[in-house]
């Protein structure tokens, strides 16, 4: 469907898409700097651990979350729900708090900062303001969702927002640890992964799958079984991201079982949505399928897979770039038109190249073929998605559709007013310069 044929309400939250693209550029540049710093040892006085935190939080809080919120809010009326009044305020608050959180994470990470002689956890405090914006969106969603007929897309949105709230238990637990003076590296790691991993597996994964289901209009029985398996598996998978020495045997067993359930559930959802998906969505669903296979393999091996950080980096990028980011671009094209996603095929190609560049960093790549060049290549190809998104960001904005011209009862165009007719005549009589 062309932009000029789209309903006027489709333009109401399009500004959020441009803001999210700007955050993608910021997060991408931060990630590219991290790779170049690792390859060449130039850090400009920054701690690379903090740079990594700033990169991931800009992607989570500034790119995916506001874009996903705006797309869900736009989709609700077409699924039988009421319009989400106030969604723009919630999305704007998510942008503002994400921007506030970026500098503390870049400079201090999760460590407290000295301000006026006091040690303040600035990054954790800023993340707390993010959480309040998300809660506001959830309240607006529940109000708009009430009474809507059940569908696969709405079930996925419901579960995604449940896990968004559930993940924040980890976010609130971190400042509570610092306030009470509890020094437990294992508990801190558990709360951090509870927040970030449940956030990405539950909120991101199910939210984007809901957008795919809203377009595919599928009610495949496999999808309902997939939702059940994912709902049971997600809460336990956070321990798979922790260092093996910090995970008790019982918790590790639960995490491995949860990972297998989540892997199987995602596989069923991909199979249910594949037939109704177009090329861009199939790219995203294919990346999700690979991610699910990796999760299943990691669950069989156990938490020891995190001893190789390159595996986790590849896994995270398969999900966050290959599935979530490409899926958001596909959903934005269907929502606001191709004019706001120009260069989307180049984006998918650049994401594929970046994902391929991460394979030589893992033990899957033969050691004799390795060397410093693998980090340089990964750093160079990190600019591919950034350039593609910049093209979307600076592309000419499509104009909202004009009101239809009045017509007579027999369908003929109504006669123009004398004043308009006179203006048109004057324009036609002007000499061509």
Image (cartoon, grey):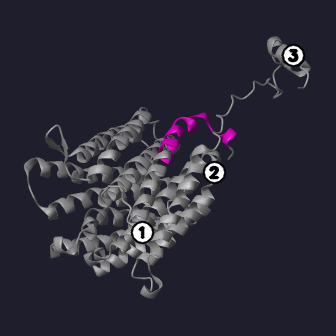
Q: CA distance from mark 1 to mark 2?
A: 32 Å
Q: Viewed as shown, does residue 342 lie left or right of 314?
A: right
- Check disc 2 and report its element: helix, strand or loop: loop
Q: Which of the image's four quarters has the C terminus?
A: top right
Q: Is residue 330 visible?
A: no
For residue 313: magenta? no
Nearer to the camera, 413 or 8:
8
Q: CA distance from mark 3 to mark 1?
A: 66 Å
- Disc 2 target residue: 342
- Disc 1 target residue: 39
Say above or below: 132 vs 287: above
**Mark toward the viewer: 1 or 2:** 1
x and y percentages locating residue 56 in the rendered image: 37, 56
In contact (CB < 8 Å): disc 3 and disc 2: no
Say above or below: 227 vs 77: below
Span shown in magenta: 3-21
x and y percentages locating residue 211 in the rendered image: 49, 53
Q: CA distance from mark 3 to mark 2?
A: 38 Å
Residue 8 appears in which quarter of the rendering? top right
Nearer to the camera, 251 or 214:
251
Along the polypeptide, which appears first: circle 3 or circle 2?
2
- Check disc 3 and report its element: helix, strand or loop: helix
Q: Viewed as shown, does residue 238 lie left or right of 342?
A: left
Q: Residues within 10 Å of mark 2 (few under 14, many from 20)?
A: many
Residue 404 appears in which quarter of the rendering? top right
Q: Which mark is residue 426?
A: 3
- Check disc 1 and report its element: helix, strand or loop: helix
Q: Main secondary structure of the magenta part?
A: helix
């Amino acid at each position: 469907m062309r932009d000029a044929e789209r309903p006027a309400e489709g333009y109401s939250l399009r500004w959020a898409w441009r803001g999210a693209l700007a955050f993608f550029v910021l997060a991408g540049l931060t990630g590219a700097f991290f790779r170049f710093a690792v390859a060449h040892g130039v850090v400009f006085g920054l701690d690379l651990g903090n740079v990594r935190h700033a990169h991931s939080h800009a992607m989570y809080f500034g790119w995916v979350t506001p874009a996903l919120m705006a797309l869900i809010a736009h989709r609700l009326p077409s699924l039988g729900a009421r319009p989400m009044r106030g969604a723009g305020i919630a999305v704007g608050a998510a942008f503002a708090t994400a921007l506030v959180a970026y500098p503390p994470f870049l400079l201090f990470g999760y460590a407290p900062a000295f301000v006026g002689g006091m040690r303040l956890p600035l990054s954790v405090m800023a993340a707390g303001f993010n959480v309040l914006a998300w809660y506001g969106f959830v309240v607006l969603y529940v109000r708009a969702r009430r009474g809507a007929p059940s569908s696969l897309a709405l079930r996925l949105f419901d579960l995604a927002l449940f896990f968004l709230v559930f993940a924040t238990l980890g976010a609130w637990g971190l400042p509570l640890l610092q306030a009470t003076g509890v020094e437990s590296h294992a508990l801190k790691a558990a709360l951090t992964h509870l927040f970030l991993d449940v956030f990405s597996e539950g909120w991101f994964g199910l939210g984007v799958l809901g957008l795919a289901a809203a377009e595919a209009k599928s009610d495949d029985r496999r999808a309902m079984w997939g939702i059940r398996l994912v709902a049971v598996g997600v809460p336990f998978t956070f321990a798979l991201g922790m260092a093996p020495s910090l995970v008790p045997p019982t918790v590790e067993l639960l995490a491995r079982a949860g990972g297998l359930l989540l892997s199987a559930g995602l596989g069923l959802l991909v199979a249910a949505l594949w037939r109704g998906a177009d090329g861009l969505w199939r790219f995203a669903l294919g990346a999700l399928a690979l991610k699910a296979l990796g999760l299943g393999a990691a669950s069989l091996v156990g938490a020891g897979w995190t001893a190789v950080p390159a595996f986790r980096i590849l896994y995270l990028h398969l999900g966050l770039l290959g599935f979530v980011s490409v899926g958001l671009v596909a959903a934005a094209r269907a929502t606001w038109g191709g004019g706001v996603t120009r260069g989307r095929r180049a984006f998918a190609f650049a994401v594929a190249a970046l994902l391929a560049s991460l394979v030589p960093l893992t033990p899957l790549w033969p050691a004799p073929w390795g060397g410093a060049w693998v980090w340089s290549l990964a750093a160079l190809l990190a600019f591919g998605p950034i350039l593609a998104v910049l093209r979307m960001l600076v592309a000419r904005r499509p104009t909202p559709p004009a009101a239809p011209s009045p017509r007579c009862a027999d369908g003929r165009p109504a006669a123009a007013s004398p004043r308009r007719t006179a203006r048109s005549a004057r324009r036609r009589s002007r000499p061509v310069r």
